[in-house]
Image (cartoon, rainbow, N blue to C red):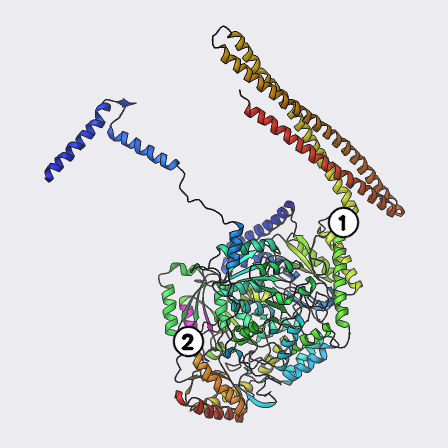
Amino acid sequence: MASAVMNMTTAALDWVSVAFDAPLARAVVFGVHIDGHLVVEVLLVAVILFQLTRKSYKPPKKPLTEKEIDDLCEEWVPEPLHPSISEDMKAEPPTLESAAGPHTIIDGKEVVNFASANYLGLIGNEKIIDSCVSSLEKYGVGSCGPRGFYGTIDVHLDCEERIAKFMGTPDSILYSYGISTIFSVIPAFCKKGDIIVADEGVHWGVQNGLHLSRSTVVYFKHNDMKSLENTLEKLTRGNKQAEKIRRYIVVEAVYQNSGQIAPLDEIVQLKEKYHFRVILDESHSFGVLGNSGRGLAEYYGVPVEKIDIITAGMGNALATDGGFCTGSVRVVDHQRLSSSGYVFSASLPPFLASAAVSAVNYLEGNPSVLTSLRSNIALLWKGLSDVPGLTIGSHPLSPIVFLKLKKSTGSSKGDLELLNNIADRMLKEDSVFIVSTKRSVLDKCRLPVGIRLFVSAGHSESDIRKVSDSLRRVATTTLAEHL
Amino acid sequence: MVRLTYLTALTTLLGYVVFFVFGFLRDLFRELFDWSKSDDLRGYAPICPPFEDFYTRRIYHRIQDCFARPIASAPDAWIDVVERYSNDNNKTLHRSSTASRCLNLGSYNYLGFAAGDEYCTPRVIESLKKYAPTACSARADAGTTRLHVELEELIARFVGKPAAITFGMGYVTNSSIIPVLVGEGGLIISDSFNHNSIVSGARASGATVHVFRHNSPSHLEEVLREQIVKGRQPGTHRPWRKILVIVEGIYSMEGEFCKLPEIVAICKKYKAYIYLDEAHSIGAVGKSGRGVCELLGVDPADIDIMMGTFTKSFGSCGGYIAASEEIIRYLKHACPAHLYATSMSPAAVQQVISAIKVVLGEDGSNRGAKKLAQIREGSNYFRSELKKMGFVVLGDNDSPVMAIMLYNLAKLPAFSRACLRQNVAVVTVGYPATPVLLARARICISASHTREDLNKGLKVISEVGGLVGAKCLPAEPEKTAAVDKLKRLKTWRKVSSIMFAAAFTAVIICSVVAAVVAAPPVAAALAAAASIPIPAGKWIDSLLKGYQDALERQKGILNSMRVGTDLTLKDLDIIQVLVDKLEIQIHSLLDASDFSLRDEDAVRFGIEEIRKKLEEFMKSVDSLDQQADRCNRDIRRARTVVLQKIIRHPN
């Protein structure tokens, strides 16, 4: 059967080729034999050409009529600008009736204040207030212009010089608000295509800077040097392109979300090994760490030139406002034209710059204030060692003493409720003002929430005893079911 | 809008080319001879992005003495500008111990609260002593003082919204609020000239951003319609969750008011939310200083989010958002600047409170109203004088901000330095704060400027403007008109000669057509005559008849065409007469102005004469216009007919 079919096919093919070849067998045009397959090829080419010349088929597009567009616009219903307001959104922070020093007045009652990052106890310092007053009388309150356009007042330049001199860096640049410093600096240096390796526990300002830079951001585990090394290794190994793109490590000196201190010595080793640059946010370590308060580099004995970019807010230890960035002349000069928070914002009110100068002067003249801050931190650690249900999560030298729940309720919302409860009760019953961590909807930090106690050199021993006793007492009753 | 001629654009670009070529050359030589001094460590990419670095080193450093001039006084009407010197070709600048007293036309000190104020300063100092310069804490923690609460109530009352929230910096207000209001899946439609803080906020939000043409409500509507119908969230392809339109009250680099009533109407129609940034307008404009809403007659209730700053009119620092109770409640719960950033300095808060009280007249005097009247009069006076001098001035009346267009980058330092030499401090702005081709000088008028101050400023700016060639429009409008008209006359001459030529061609074409039309029937007749003996005579007859009919018709058309051409010619004659008349008038006009120039006493008379002549002249130009129009139409019709004939002819 099969052979019969085969025979028939061969016969048919033979016939076809004979039929094609026969009439043209002898046809020669310009020395070319015209045979069957040439005919087929010519036909094929003709068909292809024909198809190519035809218009491609497109479904007819009918534009919407004006009326249809109107109807669609009518139909569209936007979401409201804000979600529905729940009960917990209505909480209001306490209103202060005096300066936020170690003791302040809330609702007419004097309370011990552990909620202000007044690390050196400079709030209410006579010398600083005097310098502010004389500055106010000479320069007025606001600077009425960005730095580029007559918003540069001589005290700004003095302040920049003073900070650079204090830090031992070639130059520095002032920003008008602490939180805007870091989120303007990062996008000024990191662009699309650059690599940033950042700690996962950085605060919102850094996160925003990372987002605005549009760089490739890789996070490593919070304060975990092994994880940092692995990340750097992974990013650079076999990647020859890496040499041509800018690479940064972004860390905080004292993490405001956990009170941990970044191990700068190891970071500097890693950075040199893998050719990364370091951007360090010293908001909570400037004026606190190191023998003379020069920050993390002094504390670890690392030369300050090794850190490429240092930023800090001045709203903490220096008890003023604004921020600064310090580093090489090139780093600072570049920001004067490329950093959006510097170029496009009015400059720091001159009296706050004067306050910063006086605060740095004070710190340099009274290094003993650092000793009392450190002893206060140690004292608080001792007092808090046996608080039921809570455990200290911060570094022993961090001025932020961070307490987290030993046993989480399972959700950060539930945890926060508990912690807020403790804080409220302490304020009401014991006149001790403490605060829990807050989390904005935009904050991507996933570290556990907790209570933050901001220790000040201005706290007395009895203040510290008061806060630890009160915390122990309130925690025992509030956290009874969570031990 | 900015007018930019091709020539200006070309010279400006050429200026940049020169800057860049020299910059690249210098970089090249540096690499050749100075390679050992490279700033970058080996194994690292350069720390600064190459283009920005180049711009800073090779362009900005050349002219950096014109920017960031330090002052040694409050930024009031007169300031002490510290002199600087450089030992390395402007790369680094050092302060000297001398300062020169200059008129300040650069600071945003609209209401004059920058310097000490009899009402504000004592209160500020008192608050400073009571509350210290800062609370070292965020608003949500320990940063809320009595003063903050008072300010929020006051500002809400001032702008006419139920509630408000304040922040320590205007830039942060925009850049941290926008992401809280709109997130992924939302759409932000932003004016193309919006401030960098809005751009940064929009970028941080993760929402899709579209831009509409600066201050163009019609384009906004177009974008809105398109986006509601076709715009889709990336990823899910659902319609937008919400749309936020962001505009500014006064655009700070142009001094223009936002077309708020139109924009509000469009946003209402399409259910988009509106965010109004009143950084420069709050306190500075409006009858009682309440900003553009008051000035343009918009109900604040129609605006969802009202943002503003305290840096400008109130001479302090920080910013606010005023909105409904619910929105403010939500912001206090969710906004990172409220939760994390150091709260506004209590002394600065007190400054704002006192300044607003002065503006509202709650200090028991009428100083606020006086200040508002002063700034309005001062701004309008200054603007009109600048325009009279022939500067290209941007911005609307009543706006205290005005921009003098300089275009060329090289004119910036020239203008700035020359003004400073004569003790006037002006701000010059170039890229990156403005588009590359639109460099400008910017003037901000303050209520603390007296009329003498303004006159001094005008005198110096006029001189310097002449020196650097910034007066792009010819001065004195009367003469301008004459020269303009003369130019227009020349154009008309050209136009009329073209029309003559066109008519002439038309006539020739007509005759040719006539010849062609006439030829076939003759040929056909010959053929008919030759073919009589042939039996098919009837067919030939009908053919002949058809030709004859066609001929008749064509004759009719040709006749009507001839009439048309005649008409055209007559029109052209009229134009010629008018042009002649114009010429005579222009001559007499020029004579008159010559005369007026020769004899100073007769100037006024001459100008009067010129004005009269001008009116007549304008009238004749108008009639000329109409004539030309008619003539043009006739010619076009004639040409169409001719062309049709040529195309459609049976042969």
> Where does label 2 land, which residue?
A223
Q: Determine the CA span between mark 2 and mark 1.
A: 68 Å
> Where does label 1 land, which residue?
B475
Tell me the subunit letter for badge 1: B
The residue mark sitting in front, 2 or 1, is 1
Picture quadrant where residue A340 is located: bottom right
Picture quadrant where residue B158 is located: bottom right
Q: Which residue is drawn at 68% across and 30% down?
A: B499
Secondary structure under the numbered disc 1 in the rendered image? loop
Range covered by the magenta-colored residues: A247-273
Other-residue count near label 2 (Cα within 10 Å), few / some / many at <14 / 14–19 / ≥20: many
Q: Quadrant of the C terminus of chain A?
A: bottom left
Magenta-colored stretch includes residue A262: yes
Q: Is residue B641 above or below residue B441?
A: above
Magenta-colored stretch includes residue A290: no
Secondary structure under the numbered disc 2 in the rendered image? loop
Other-residue count near label 1 (Cα within 10 Å), few / some / many at <14 / 14–19 / ≥20: some
Q: Nearer the viewer, residue B244 or B456?
A: B244
Q: In which quarter of the image is the N terminus of chain A?
A: top left
Q: Which amino acid does label 1 sit on?
A: Ala
Q: Which of B244 and A169 is in front in this view?
A: B244
Horizontal arrangement in the rendering, residue A133 relative to residue B28 (left or right): right
Mark 2 and mark 1, same subunit?
no
Q: Residue B437: x, y in percent? A: 61, 52
Q: Which residue is drawn at 76% across and 49% down?
A: B475
Q: Which amino acid does label 2 sit on?
A: Asn
Q: Is residue B455 above or below residue A178?
A: above
Picture quadrant where residue B52 is located: bottom right
Horizontal arrangement in the rendering, residue B160 relative to residue B455 (left or right): left
